[in-house]
Amino acid sequence: MKLFASILTASAITGSIWGLVLFQPAMAESAKQDELKPDVSIAQAHTQGEKKLPEIERQYLNGVTKNIALESMSALWGEFEGEWVKQNKLPEKLDRIVVLYQDLNSDFTQAKVTIGYIAPEQASSKDFIALPLMGKGNEDVLASRGQYSVSEFIDAWGRIDFKKSVDALVEVHYLSPQGQPESSQLSVYYK
């Protein structure tokens, strides 16, 4: 019964996301940015004969964050639109919207959810939300970047390994230069 509730919740979330993304105003002259990927630099220097391990830089989201029931996602999308889209707070060159689900309860009905965009590297704020560290071997891509129907995206949510402890889920909705949704990606991070 919990699987059915999870699938129903995922379909409501996905439908709400696409509904709100489709009705957002077009963005003026957006340029492509690098895809959401780990920014890994390997140090070449040796310290007393030892190589340094790769340094993983953390990425941050700027947007709206709330602890909500996942069935209330449309309200959070509305808040994001009201606070960011309508008030022109989004960057001019925006190529994706990221949805971060953290602190999910045991039956995946409530979570701390952030809807926003990746903050510029030079920006700093205590209000930014850290994305999970990538490249630690704890990530599973449930739906690689592509176009998905609602049922295909629900199937992707169904591929979460519930035997493992989930740290976060990250949905990335890629936008065209006009600000319209082009493709999506879904990843899960385990503790």
Image: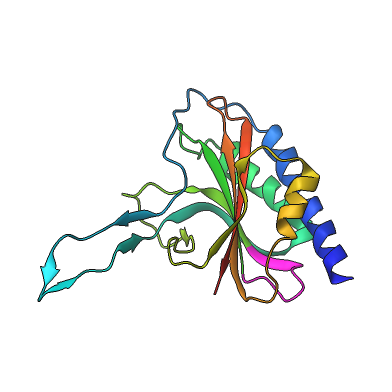
Identify which residue is drawn at 49% across, 52% down.
Answer: 62
In this picture the colour scheme is: rainbow
Instruction: Classify residue 83 by image quadrant.
Output: top right
The quarter of the picture where the C terminus appears is bottom right
Tell me the residue at 22%/69% (across/down): 52
Residue 108: x and y, percent?
Answer: 74, 68
**Depth check, front residue: 186 or 137:** 137
Q: Is residue 114 magenta?
A: no
Q: Position of residue 54 (x, y in %)?
A: 29, 64
Q: Quadrant of residue 66?
A: bottom right
Secondary structure that dominates the magenta span: loop
Q: Nearer the viewer, residue 13 or 112?
A: 13
Is residue 110 rendered magenta in the image? yes
- Relative height, residue 58 to residue 84 (above, below): below
> Total marks drawn?
0
Q: Is residue 150 toward the left or the right of residue 187 in the image?
A: right
Residue at the farthest right position: 1
Q: Position of residue 142 (x, y in %)?
A: 64, 55
What is the x, y in percent for residue 85?
Answer: 59, 38
Question: Is 113 rendered above or below residue 74?
Answer: below
Answer left or right for 185 relative to 16: left
Residue drawn 76% across and 40% down? 149
Foreground of the two, 111 or 64:
111
> For this view, does 71 lie left or right of residue 165?
right
Give above or below for 22 relative to 79. Answer: above
Q: Quadrant of the N terminus?
A: bottom right
Q: In this view, which residue lies farthest toward the front?
A: 49
Residue segment shown in magenta:
103-112
